Amino acid sequence: MTPSLVLHNLFVSSASHRVRIGLHLKGLAFEYVSVNILEQDTPAFAAYKEKNPQGLVPTLFHGDVRLTQSLAILEYLDEVFPAPALLPKDPAARARVRSLAMYCVAEMQPLQNLRVVRHLRSALGRSDEDAAAWRQHWVSLGFDNLEKDLASPDTGTFCHGDTPTLADCCLIPQIRSARRWGLDVARWPRIHRIGAHADAHEAFQKAAPENQPDTPKSA
């Protein structure tokens, strides 16, 4: 029997969103388990920390295999379920796709996540307005540089060529976050264009935060 895929995640989490995109691009069925990381003083969250000691999402189970960290999960899926591929075969192209993904995963998202913003407010006494300005600054800086890299002739309909890759799995959630923080993504024409193509793609639509079972009705 083929081991089942079980994804512990949260609709609004950009890291969870990346993995959902990868799963849907590959046409893989998975069980969706909602984890509310916003309510940490609950028995349900304590039980989740037994699965992921960091208390972060996502966590993917594939039978007895337990995986955390979105990029590691996506690369695992690409190795175990190789078609359609999220990474090109050519080594230079693979490196470029990973590099584009890291703009979002390493340069932008860590500086805007919930733990960082909570620290700004509680430990450093910053206001909500300060926290919003912080997020906008780091996302804008990241997009400024990513936009330049996407000027490459290797960029096509998507970040690399005309089919979605690991880079698009990471970029699209970052675009969603940028809009949530009040940024007009049209400032970055290449990023905006890639986002528009993704919005018309069925796998990206299925993975979108508003289409998840734990999405609040008002979201």
Image (cartoon, rainbow, N blue to C red):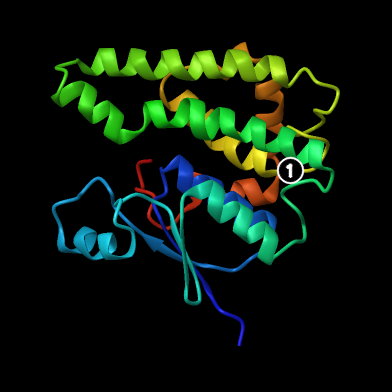
In this view, the residue in front, 185 or 68, is 68
Q: Amino acid at mark 1?
A: Pro
Horizontal side, residue 161 vs residue 49: left or right: right
- Asked if residue 27 can be seen in this view, the reply is no
Q: Position of residue 154 (x, y in %)?
A: 84, 28
How many residues crowd mark 1 within 10 Å: few (<14), some (14–19), many (20+)?
many
Query: Which image quadrant is residue 194 in?
Result: top right
The N terminus sits in image quarter: bottom right
At horizontal 38% and vertical 40% (from top left) the residue drawn is: 219
Asked whether, in this view, residue 162 is left or right of residue 172, the answer is: right
Residue 96, position as x, y percentages in the image = 73, 33
Instruction: Please name the residue that numbered disc 1 is placed on.
Output: 164
What residue sits 27% from the left and 65% below the top?
50
Up/down of 31 relative to 193, above or below: below
Relative to 128, 111 lies left or right: right
Q: What secondary structure is found at the residue carrying circle 1?
A: loop
**Relative to residue 119, is residue 198 depicted above or below?**
below
Is residue 106 visible in the rendered image? The answer is yes
Q: Position of residue 97 (x, y in %)?
A: 71, 36
Q: Nearer the viewer, residue 60 or 176?
A: 60
List the single residue furthest toward the front. 91
| 187 lies above or below 219 | above
Q: Which quadrant of the view contains residue 91?
A: top right
